Image (cartoon, grey):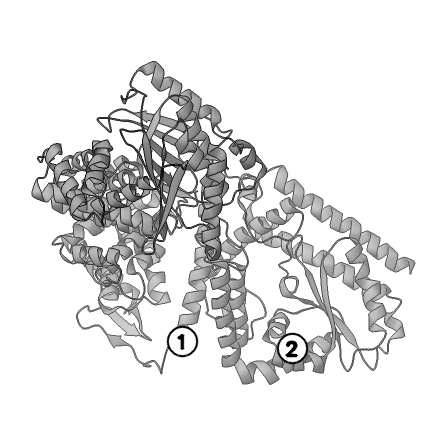
Amino acid sequence: MSTLKQTTELYSATYSNILSSHRSLLFSSPSTSEETPGMLKKHALSIDHYFQSCFESSNIGPKMDFIRNPYAIIALGGYGRSEQCIHSDVDLLFLFQKHVPTAADELIREIIYPLWDLKIEVGYATRSVDECVSMARGDYEILTSILDARFICGISSVFIKLRDQIRRKIVKRNSQKIMKWLIERNIKRHQNFGDSTFLLQPNLKEGQGGLRDYHTLRWIATIKYDLQHTRDLEFQGVMSHLEYNELMAALSFIWNVRNKLHLLTKRKCDQLYFEHQRPVAESMGFSDEKGQSAVEKFLGELHFHMAFIKNQLQLFLYEFGYGKRGKWRQSARKIGETPGIKLFKERLNFDSPETILNDPEMLIKIFEVSARLKMPLSREAERLVREFNYLVDDSFRESLIVRNLFEKILILPVPTFNVLEQMLNTGFLASLIPEYKNIINRIQYDAYHLYPVDRHLLKTVYTLKMFGETGNSEQDGLCARLYRGLKRKKILLLAALLHDIGKGQEGRHSLAGAEISGTVLKRMGYNPREIDLVSFLIENHLLLIKIATRRDINDEETAIACARQIKDGKRLIMLYLLTVADSCATGPKAWNSWTSSLLRDFFLKVLGIIEKGEFATTSVVNRITRKRNAVLTAGQGLEVEDVLRIFDQMSPRYVLYTEAEDIITHILLYNRLPGKPFVLNVVHDAELNSRTVTICAIDRPGLFSKIAGVFTLNNINILDVQVNTWKNDIAMDIFRVEPPPEQLFEDERWQRVENNLKAVLAGEMDLQAEMSQKTVTGKRETAVLSIRPNRVAVDNNGSSFYTIIEVFSYDFKGLLYSVTDAISQLGLNITVAKIATKVDQVVDVFYVCDETGSKVDEPAAVDQIKKEILAILPAQTNE
């Protein structure tokens, strides 16, 4: 017993030393990923040594019938593969040749319990060989764990017998069924955990491109080739020497990240949460540079390695015919139109490497054939493209033939796969356009962008081309009509491919991108007119979306200013299509029905001004007269005298920008107001999935901020506000809001809003105190991803009548209430509010005037606005 105790104490000391050495690598000097496989194997070997020592010194082992019923201790899972991260589970199998003896429980207590005392997670099973085979036949989870099994100690013949029976009785007889199960399980796992090759908080193990994809590839290769070691992937011809080395580099990097994550959290952890990213990045030697943070560089490299694993699994599965119906032709078929390229097993390949050496333009011709025939490149073709990319020199890039082929690739309809993505993955796109190298795997570290910059650009091109294929929704229908009507689609697609190429450069990325695109297109031989148009689209690709979400688009002046800047209807159409595609490709948080509606309405308004020349030529008096007549005509039984009396109390701006039917609704609300503090009306908009809440009340200081506070208190997110004050001091405030949570009880929620607002206006509820005691949830509350300073901008040029205040900040409970209350305390009246959440930062925009109805343009007053609003923003660096 003393010997076993000494073994346990020795392993405890060894385990402490391993933890200590890992921590020193984490916190002292940056560790390299090349060291990681050796560290994982060393950790597994230290555990092996513990079990081997226990086996030798066991007090229970000799009591079992070891001669008649020999047993072995077997490592499973990551421990079986000798890929043991520091806090990963230790999975074991106590394997008996004939049956599990009653003394096995005592053996477990003797060997496993001391590890549990050390807080090591150990999972074990005690089974006979026959039981293992029977269970593995019915449960493929058990089977995969045995495929990774490794002998530790005991009688090796028991382990060999298990492996032999598993292969002979299960694997050989059911290989197709097992592989189908593995692939289907992989698909479900990807659906649950997402694509880790671009997620900002990737799952290192279960996400697509994670370690489980590597395990799946290894298991399927083991079934087909009886793999014993990972190196056999190269020896069996599954991968080339270069691909195997790249695989090991990718695995080493991910294992390194995972190990550091375990050490930081002091437990097993596979989800790379935001709070752990900077310490892991810095421990791996990444540092902040101008234009890119350490975390962005770290995530870029992580995504690069995970994308490689993802692509290797996809290529491996395709080459073995997964997803293919029927049989492939066993002979290669020549591509008549393009000599030197052949089709085999529905994949394109070169006739030989000499084909490329004799004609380097074959490098782009194979991608043009791929786009035209809708057939992807084979693994061998991709290898050859990578190896011969050095042939892409300036003369290649300046070739008219190359340019024409590239344009065909851009313009051809979208196949089931993205040809441009193949060009990116093989490095050809960056060889053709060297400026692309600066954005490959460049992470945009916010929850706004789903993809790295390079893949976002390809996604934008793909989205544009899909406009030509679809047109189901109203938005898609408009985009489809506009896209199909374009005569120069290549200009728009080139702009889409290059619109963010200036990311990472100093200054505005749109300006840098316009300059870089000019260099690229000039080198490719485009004429100055084409270059100017592409540069214009890139420089202004954020213009429409910023105006639509941050400015009062009901104000004709806004649309006129935009029309004067764009000038040409065809340019506007291209810019609109690029804006929609860019927003869709950014991610669902950047594009929704509300944003879509704002952008579409603003685009049509600007297009009308450009095409018809309607530069406010109709007098305001005539327009108000027509609006009054329209209200009288559709008066819904209202007395003419009442309508005229109330109409005279309305402000000109309200009349100009409010539809006649809405004016009638507001008159009816006004007639219900006498004797009440306010009247509230809610209208559902199913198409936009929003609510229009109109509140008619006697105007008073801070009314808007109080309403905003009550909405916040009830978890209702405001999208847009029109604040209207009539001449008789009646406030007619119109809020566009998201549906409240728990829509089943929506009526009760609006009743609570009404009751809360009554109490606040009557002085019976302290709004600030209520919000400080209540946890408010909602979509505007987001994780802080990067530290951007709070900023308040005051614009006196964007409107002729109002000062525009833009507030950039991180969201917090009651932000909108606090900002509007601060504006009210400054003696300013809010007429329009635009609530634009950039996901990682809120942008609240307010059109204000002082108590006399004038703009606030005195420098001292402007400084005071900035000072007072910054004072109530959450603690960040302020600008």
Name the spot of residue 640 as percent of width and height, x first: 18, 42
Q: Which of the numbered marks, if any, corresponds to residue 321?
A: 1
Q: CA distance from mark 1 to mark 2?
A: 27 Å
Q: Is residue 144 visible?
A: yes
**Looking at the picture, how far across and down is residue 147, in whole percent?**
61, 72
Q: Viewer-proximal residue, 335 or 759? A: 759
Q: Which residue is mark 2?
A: 163
Where is residue 529, by image quadrant? top left
- Element assignment for label 2: helix
Q: Earlier in the sequence, mark 1 or mark 2?
A: 2
For the N terminus, the image quarter is bottom right
Left or right for 595, reference 703: left
Position of 227 relative to 268 (above/below): below
Q: Quadrant of residue 478?
A: bottom left
Question: Going by the image, does 515 lie left or right of 791?
Answer: left
Residue at x 59% of width, y 70% of height: 228
Image-based side of 501 in relation to 296, left or right:
left
- At 78% across and 81% down in the image, what residue appears? 99
Q: Is residue 878 left or right of residue 384?
A: right
Is residue 392 depicted above or below 847 in this figure?
A: below
Q: Amino acid at mark 1?
A: Gly
Task: Pick whichever, 618 or 258, lies toward us.
Answer: 618
- Numbered disc 1: secondary structure: loop
Name which residue type carries label 2: Arg
For mark 2, does the 10 Å Cα neighbourhood hold few (<14), some (14 to 19), or many (20 or more) residues? some
